[in-house]
Image: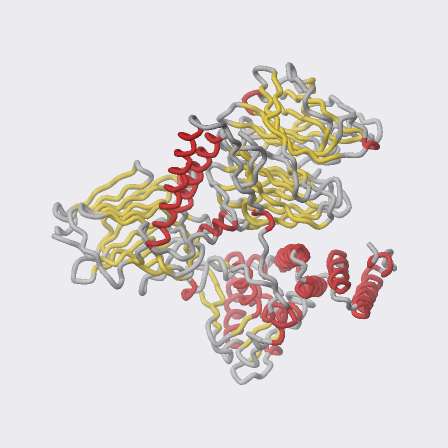
């Protein structure tokens, strides 16, 4: 953890203890299992006691926390399979109407227990406690869901029971929902086995003592979800827009004057709603907040370039999506990048600082919903806070105080004087009317400004996102600061951001029900059109060192951690005792810069010479570049796929990583105007013809199950789209040989202008672009010029006139002293620019290489 000031000894001990408790929290992470939306061989399983079956006596209890993913999958959660002739039991999950149904079955005989809870209850919180208890001597089995719903049933009486315990896929039971488990405890009257699931990689499952008891396959260790930000969705608008996250409903909103886009984090899908009447406020920057009490989204503007008459505040009902004018009060103040926070209990929006008319601001203003007016905040001293913008605000539910962090500005408030970065924290006691500076850091690292939204989950920590606003293409980083003294550490990996325009923004939220941090990143290249990306990170977040701290789970390692913690706490106690008897000395803990952790360098040219993958010459399907299908003999049979067959095949394929595409949706997309009876015939003929065309390709088939179609791919069939999706889901390097060669074939579905694939093509291209931008920034930071150029060149395969690719590629070639190649690289870009845009690229080669 970074050092801000000299730590008092008591604070040191407190941090030692809290760090130990935090380690305990990390010990309990969890495992995510994939279900029916994946091919059978890719579905997950956790298999315990298959080799050494422990004997359970008395009452066998299996406790775990369960999270069900909202993707429509259902199936077997857990199976108890005895090694002898005793009964086998399983627990099955399904949804019926508006209920989540759990069935405990004696396998092959009957359903013993049926418990149902409302879907609202299932979605109300992330984790649902489950207990299966088998009283062996009394012959009674009980199932408990959410510590409330319980039901018991008679079962066979046994002296002991020795089952293998399997979660997910087991033998021929292949129907598996998408779910996660954590806090697994298996116990009887004599023993207790606790499974913390703390690893980030590997296929072995250990108990809390480090003993191996089972294996996992096709799972995701949830520890990774606390380090790697996951992009949950992206939305686009060609008009000036705003964005918000609704913590109460787990929805991300993206709005412009005539439409609202709603992204559902639980389901991972987006819906679009067109307003019956446009937003009454002329949207300029799209400032907004949500009042969950009335379920309304408020939009406000503080300034227009010309005299303005009309509404400045309006609200949108998130129930019927109608607008209501709230106020025409006009501040007339340009408050760009101001800090803002809405306090629901006061029904008031607090706004601080901002920049405009060459001035920095340090006024606190308040918009009161009940009287629809802006007023100066009452009894809030601002004397200690210097004029600034790019500041961030948040509210501590425990401390009952507003906090304000950092920004840029100066003492005079005049832009012409020059600005400096602030790394200070204030608490604003709204009830007592006091403003207090808690600390100020002497910042030694690269400068950053905080994104909007401080997360203060307790009375100890503050979480914020920061990025260097002076760099067009940069990375957003999460940091955790101590409220007590400002000591901090860097958590999680980073998020790419393009911050060249004033409408660019990012905001951090804490969703307690999902137990996640949510980041909304809105980017624009012209202050008109924009893109919003929604990212999520499991909370509490962890550092890179914590991600890899437990990759080798052994008794020795567990004992080492416990012993280390005991030594630290004991040493601290001794120091505290000695402090009372010796001259006071300042405690100077060693400073540790975790933010500069370097990734291993990758020499692309060396990697290219050692091919780990070669283009298959048979049983292959290529969707990048020209649509190509090779049969088992290597013959090109692409001509067998008509435009309609390609369309249907690609639709089924891109939906195959979920539950598949329903026959209803497939019919609606492909034959939207045909009557039902004729659609069914057309669909059947098309599917049959598609299967015939694929008949000579080994390892691929069209599967129809539960009303859904999927493309099932297995060895020896190669499909470039499936390979890429698998690589991206496992965070494989895009500039590795196999993936880069795949992308170099050409764009996804090249030459297809079918609007059915526009969204898929856009999402895939944007995800690839984002990852390559991130790779370039990291490679530049590490001065790995070969890899930087490889990433830049690959980015320009996707987008031939991507300026970041041009600039970073030229930087790499300059560092490699490849002037001639740099000139050719620039010429290729300008030729494409002229061809695509019909105009000359405005920046010369000399200007670029001298910047």
Point 68% across, 33% down: residue = 422
Whether residue 466 is situated above or below residue 372 in the rendered picture:
below
Classify residue 1 as left or right of residue 413: left
Point 74% across, 28% down: residue = 302
Q: Position of residue 485 (x, y in %)?
A: 55, 31
Q: Nearer the viewer, residue 387 or 441?
A: 441
Q: Nearer the viewer, residue 557 or 800?
A: 557
Q: Position of residue 595 (x, y in %)?
A: 59, 47
Looking at the image, can residue 741 be seen?
yes
Q: How many marks?
A: 0
Classify residue 803 as left or right of residue 787: right
Looking at the image, can residue 34 be seen?
no
Q: Position of residue 789 (x, y in %)?
A: 70, 64
Q: Position of residue 610 (x, y in %)?
A: 59, 76
Q: Nearer the viewer, residue 636 or 277?
A: 636
**Quarter the C terminus occupies:** bottom right
Classify residue 424 as left or right of residue 95: right
Whether residue 817 is situated above or below residue 467 in the rendered picture:
below
Whether residue 749 is situated above or below residue 131 in the rendered picture:
below
Q: Nearer the viewer, residue 758 or 425?
A: 425
Query: What colour scheme governs how the chains and residues are painted in the rendered image of this protein?
Result: secondary structure
Whether residue 699 is situated above or below residue 15 in the rendered picture:
below
Residue 54, quarter of the rendered image: bottom left
**Residue lying farthest front?**
582
Residue 258, quarter of the rendered image: top right
Point 43% across, 64% down: residue = 42
């Amino acid at each position: 953890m970074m050092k801000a000031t000299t730590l008092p000894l008591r604070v040191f001990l407190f941090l030692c203890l809290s760090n130990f408790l935090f380690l305990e929290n990390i010990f309990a992470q969890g495992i995510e299992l994939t279900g029916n939306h994946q091919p059978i061989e890719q579905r997950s399983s956790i298999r315990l006691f298959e080799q050494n079956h422990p004997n359970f006596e008395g009452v066998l209890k299996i406790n775990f926390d369960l999270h069900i993913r909202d993707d429509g999958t259902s199936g077997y959660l857990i199976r108890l399979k005895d090694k002898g002739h005793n009964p086998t039991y399983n627990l099955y999950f399904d949804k019926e109407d508006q209920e989540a149904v759990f069935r405990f079955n004696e396998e092959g005989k009957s359903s013993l227990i049926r418990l149902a809870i409302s879907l609202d209850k299932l979605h109300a919180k992330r984790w649902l406690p489950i207990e299966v208890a088998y009283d062996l001597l009394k012959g009674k089995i009980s199932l408990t869901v959410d510590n409330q719903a319980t039901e018991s049933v008679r079962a066979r009486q046994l002296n002991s029971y020795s089952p293998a315990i399997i979660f997910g896929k087991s033998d021929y039971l292949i129907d598996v929902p998408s779910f996660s488990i954590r806090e697994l405890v298996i116990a009887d009257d004599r023993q207790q086995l606790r499974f913390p699931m703390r690893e980030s990689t590997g296929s072995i499952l250990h108990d809390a003592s480090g003993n191996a008891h089972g294996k996992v396959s096709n799972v995701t260790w949830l520890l990774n979800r606390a380090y790697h930000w996951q992009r949950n969705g992206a939305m686009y608008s060609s008009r000036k827009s705003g964005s918000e996250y609704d913590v109460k409903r787990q929805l991300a909103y993206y709005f412009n004057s005539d439409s609202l886009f709603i992204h559902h984090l639980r389901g991972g899908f987006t819906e679009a709603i067109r307003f019956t009447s446009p937003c009454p406020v002329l949207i300029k920057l799209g400032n907004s907040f949500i009042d969950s009490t009335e379920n309304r989204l408020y939009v406000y503007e503080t300034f227009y370039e010309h005299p303005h008459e009309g509404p400045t505040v309006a609200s949108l009902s998130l129930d019927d999506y109608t607008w209501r004018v709230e106020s025409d009060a006009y501040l007339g103040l340009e408050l760009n990048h101001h800090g803002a926070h809405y306090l629901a209990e006061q029904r008031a929006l607090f706004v601080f600082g901002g920049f405009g008319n060459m001035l920095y601001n340090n006024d606190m203003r308040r918009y009161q919903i009940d009287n629809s007016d802006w007023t100066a905040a009452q009894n809030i001293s601002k004397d200690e806070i210097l004029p600034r913008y790019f500041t961030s605000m948040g509210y501590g539910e425990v401390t009952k105080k507003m906090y304000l962090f950092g920004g840029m500005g100066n003492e005079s408030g005049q832009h012409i004087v020059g600005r400096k970065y602030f790394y200070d924290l204030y608490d604003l006691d709204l009830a007592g009317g006091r403003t207090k500076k808690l600390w100020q850091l002497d910042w030694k690292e690269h400068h950053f400004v905080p994104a909007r939204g401080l997360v203060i989950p307790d009375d100890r920590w503050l979480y914020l996102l920061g990025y260097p606003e002076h760099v067009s293409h940069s990375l957003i980083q999460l940091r955790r600061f101590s409220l007590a003294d400002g000591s901090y550490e860097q958590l999680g990996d980073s998020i790419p951001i393009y911050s060249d325009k004033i409408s660019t923004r990012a905001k951090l939220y804490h969703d307690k029900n999902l137990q996640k941090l949510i980041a909304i990143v809105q980017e624009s290249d012209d202050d008109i059109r924009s893109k919003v990306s929604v990212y999520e990170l499991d909370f509490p977040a962890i550092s890179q060192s914590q991600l890899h701290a437990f990759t080798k789970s052994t008794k020795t390692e567990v004992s080492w951690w416990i012993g280390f913690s005991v030594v630290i706490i004991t040493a601290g106690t001794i120091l505290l005792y000695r402090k009372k008897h010796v001259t006071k000395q300042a405690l100077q803990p060693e400073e540790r810069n975790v933010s500069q952790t370097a990734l291993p360098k990758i020499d692309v040219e060396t990697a290219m010479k050692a091919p780990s993958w070669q283009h298959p010459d048979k049983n292959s399907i290529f969707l990048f570049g020209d649509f190509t299908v090779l049969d088992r003999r290597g013959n090109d049979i692409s001509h067998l796929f008509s435009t309609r067959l390609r369309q249907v095949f690609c639709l089924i394929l891109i939906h195959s990583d979920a539950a598949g595409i329903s026959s209803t949706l497939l019919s609606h997309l492909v034959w939207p105007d045909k009557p039902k009876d004729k659609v069914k015939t057309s669909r059947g003929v098309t599917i049959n013809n598609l299967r015939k065309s694929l008949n000579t390709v080994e390892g691929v088939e069209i599967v129809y199950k539960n009303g859904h179609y999927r493309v099932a791919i297995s060895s020896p069939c190669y499909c470039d789209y499936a390979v890429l999706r698998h690589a991206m889901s496992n965070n494989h390097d895009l500039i590795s040989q196999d993936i880069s060669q795949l992308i170099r074939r050409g764009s996804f579905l090249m030459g297809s202008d079918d609007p059915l694939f526009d969204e898929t093509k856009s999402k895939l291209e944007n995800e690839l672009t984002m990852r390559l931008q991130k790779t370039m920034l990291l490679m530049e930071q590490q001065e790995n010029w070969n890899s930087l150029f490889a990433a830049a060149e690959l980015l320009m395969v996707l987008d031939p006139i991507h300026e970041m690719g041009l600039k970073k590629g030229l930087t790499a070639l300059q560092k490699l002293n490849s002037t001639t190649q740099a000139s050719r690289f620039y010429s290729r870009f300008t030729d494409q620019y002229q061809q695509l845009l019909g105009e000359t690229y405005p920046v010369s080669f000399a200007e670029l290489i001298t910047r």
